[in-house]
Amino acid sequence: MTRMDRLVLGEIVGWFVGSVLLFSSLILASGELVRLAEFLQNGQTLWLVLQLLAYTLPQIFALTFPIAMLLATLMGMGRLSSNSELTALVAAGVSFERIMLPISVFGLLVSLVGVWFTNSIVPASSAARNRIIDRVQKEGSFTLANSFSRRIVLNDQANSVLFLRVEGGIFVGQDGPGSATLQNLSIERWQNNRLNSVVFADRAIWKIGSNDWVLNGKPIYGFDFDPRGGGGLLLASSLATREQPLGKPDELIALKEVRTEDVSTAGLRERSRLFKANGDARAARDAEVEAARRVALPFASFVFALVGAPLGVRPPRTGNGGGFGIAIAITFLYWTLLQLFTVIGRGGALPPAISVMIPNLLGLGVGVFLIRRVLRS
């Protein structure tokens, strides 16, 4: 490594490490710390919360690598050019392509480490984190939501729906391990846009794995508005053992089946093979898209190195205060494109591996254009 390489990398690496820590802190502060604090408020130990934090950090780090690389190249090259060091290198006969070489190698190295990190460390840490959450929620009493409402379709052809309104919240483990409880709820049954009945109850208990909730507690009452069923007041004696097909609420996401983010990349490929063998093409594509994203997103670090370095070049003695804003704008555009082409890949319009890689290919084209523009100038 030449002295010039050490000079360039000295500016880039420092900014990269600092940016990873900065953006990781922002992500933690924006929501994760609040969720972890809820565990402490619900009586969990500090050791358990620290374990959750340790298992959460790898997922956050993996997300920050690309934007950290973009900000590092913008700020690092901006400082070299604003202090006339870049001008001095060019005046000494060093081409811009040669200056870009250590940046490109570092970006590629970060991408390769990111691919390994995303495919090896992140799924294992995510699975460990969710196992802890599942255990806490299944074995202990834990509040998942305060109040919510939901429309539940019973029979689409018959236009039969339920409207569930929960005022008292949803709790896990309150009525024993493997249970969930709704408190202070009302259930409206509609048929062909007409209200058939409404039921009010103190509680409804769900045994994890089923779709039915058993109403209990006092009072339990309701009204039947359908004259064909007799109509009139529904009393507790007729409702005490009634099961309501309310399904598995979205709030119990931590209690659902194996999550895609917890599955290893080899496991995703096996899932895809099994889904295809059973004729479920959509589920197979979902697994393939997730596996492809685990390569595409880390590879963005290399792309952002090629984009950020020429964008960071500016006239001597000018500030680089706009670098942060540029990094956020480019990252937002990239993330929007990645989400768009992820949907396209899942829909089957393009092969998953190609679809999620298109934002990177577009970024490479932009990077080459920007580098050639610097060379011309």
Image: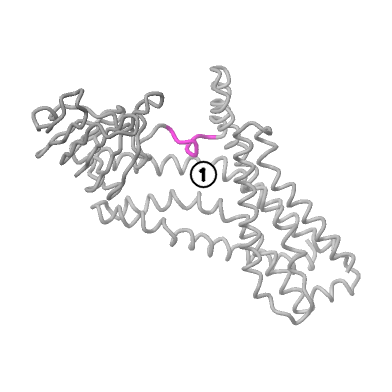
Give the extent of the magenta segment. 258-264
Residue type at tag 1: Val
Left or right of 273 in this view: 213: left
- Asked whether 85 or 173 is in front, the reply is 173
Q: Quadrant of the C terminus?
A: bottom right
Left or right of 98 in this view: 165: left
Q: Quadrant of the N terminus?
A: bottom right
Left or right of 311 in this view: 218: left
Q: Residue at x 70, y 48 (%)?
A: 360
Per the image, the residue denoted by label 1 is 122
Whole-percent x, y for residue 167 in the image: 23, 48
Query: Which colour assignment does the render follow?
Result: one colour
Whole-percent x, y for residue 305 in the image: 71, 58
* Residue 315 falls in image quadrant: bottom right
Estimate how packed mark 1 is, as few (under 14), some (14 to 19) or many (20 or more) residues with alpha carbons within 10 Å. many
- Asked whether 22 or 164 is in front, the reply is 164
- Asked whether 296 or 194 is in front, the reply is 194
Q: Residue at x 65, y 34 (%)?
A: 352
Q: Residue at x 43, y 62 (%)?
A: 29
Whole-percent x, y for residue 228 in the image: 20, 23
Magenta-colored stretch includes residue 260 = yes
Magenta-colored stretch includes residue 316 = no
* Residue 257 falls in image quadrant: top left
* Residue 281 falls in image quadrant: top right
Q: Element under label 1?
A: helix
Whole-percent x, y for residue 60 in the image: 51, 53
